Image (cartoon, rainbow, N blue to C red):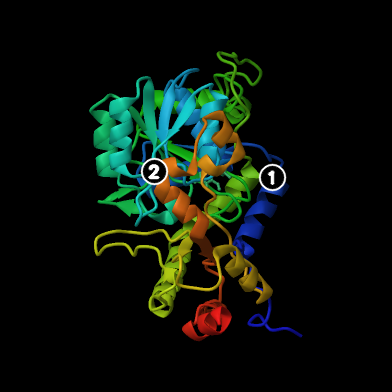
Amino acid sequence: METKEQQPIPFALPDIGREEEEAVLRVLRSGWLTTGKEAISFEKEFAEAVSAHSALAVNSATAGLHLAAEALGVCPGDKVVTTPFTFTSTAEILRYLGADPIFADIDEETLTIDPRCVAEILDREPKIKGVIPVHLGGRMAEMDRIVSEAKKRGLFVIEDAAHAFPLSYKGKAAGTIGDAGVFSFYATKTITTGEGGMVVTDNEALAKRMSVMRLHGIDRDVWDRYSSSKGSWRYAVVAAGYKYNLTDLAAAIGRVQLKRAQEFKERRCRIASYYEAELGGIEALKLPKPPGRKEDHAWHLFIVRLRPGYSAIDRDGMVEALKARGIGTSVHYIALHLMPYYRSRYNLSPEQFPVATAVSNSCFSLPIYPSMSDGQVERVVEAIKELLSPNRRRTQTQ
Ligand SMILES: Cc1ncc(COP(=O)(O)O)c(C=O)c1O
């Protein structure tokens, strides 16, 4: 039989234990499956964890981003600045509202939106409503500069914190620095509920609007109607809302994962340090910029890049070669300006975003998750060393 050390290493694997299983069983047997007590407790516990006034559980970060943009008044014809180096959710939610993303190139080192490009766009473009930075792979975007550029022009900031739990920035949690922050609990994220997300804000009016729009534009949620002594049937529809609530089944998993978040992070940090120590000397490979002494990193992703001209193998070849050795990788991201929809709708070219284009063509992400054994991490390192060794380059180019 294959031991764990011989089995294929998936790119990502959720860490679901006995406590999560028991939590789901408890909810299944309780008779209440949709949004109720568990979701309310999850929200309270999450709000506490990030020191936010309000946290709203939603069924995805995409839903959360949509709710936040709607509540902040994004309307048809508006423009919002964001990064092209992200998943499509960050930009597509603007299209839901009839608004348009304006992409700003990214910083070569951090791969997060470049505040200089943001400022340049804000000076040039009319009708900009706000900025959506992404804390890519668990590295904080440069929030001081982004918030200051936005606030001096009266614009909102929504933090796409899908990769950023737990992560802190100058004593504050990621997601609590802008007007709203949105976390993802998708299956591969740092904590998971299968599908799910959380929107946090300190702005009460914003929280109220998002809470109403999260459930059909109804002024009372289902649990409130069910458990209230004022009567269970009366409610008012005050807007054409959405169906974005999180089930109690998912919330119960999330509550357990939340308790384990720090332990998960410690393991990811150890794996990142090992990768840095072992792969740092390979000329052909550019590693993610390590956080500075006072900086934090959630290490959701470990994104490496192949330096052009340093190896005989290109990125696609590397992904395939690692796959052949039983090692799963992924690509974060093919930048949005290279995607057919955004490219053709906004007439974008690769040259407009030189950094995002170059990174997009050379990056791939290594597995980094808490249940990886030391042996598996070593296998990843050995395979990369073998594939990128200078000897191999010589024999391949001869
Ligand atoms: C940067 C970023 N934003 C938003 C999302 C959307 O998250 P969800 O799948 O929870 O909707 C993702 C998902 O992968 C993401 O990577």
Q: Residue 330 versus residue 57: which sits nearer the camera? A: 330
Would residue 248 be seen by someone viewing this image from the given angle? yes
- The residue singled out by tag 1 in the image is 30
Farthest residue, direction front: 398
Q: Of residues 279 and 228, which is closer to you in this image?
A: 279
The quadrant holding residue 17 is: bottom right
Between 370 and 39, the one lying in front of the other is 370
Q: Residue furthest right?
A: 1
Work out whether 242 lies above or below 115: above
In the image, is the residue at mark 2 within 8 Å of ligand 1 by its beta carbon?
Answer: no
User: Does the beta carbon at disc 1 come under 8 Å from ligand 1?
Assistant: no
Q: Which residue is mark 2?
A: 105
Tell me if 320 is positioned left or right of 52 in this view: right
The quadrant of the picture occupied by the C terminus is bottom right
- The quarter of the picture where the N terminus appears is bottom right
Give the residue drawn at x 54%, y 73%. 312
Figure disc tally: 2
Mark 1 crowd level (few <14, some 14–19, many ≥20, 10 Å Cα): few
Residue that appears at 44% across and 66% down: 307
Q: Position of residue 125 (x, y in %)?
A: 35, 24
Q: Residue at x 55, y 64 (%)?
A: 315
- Estimate how packed mark 2 is, as few (under 14), some (14 to 19) or many (20 or more) residues with alpha carbons within 10 Å: many
Distance in Å between CA atoms under marks 1 and 2:
50 Å
Residue 335 image offset from top left, x and y in percent: 51, 46
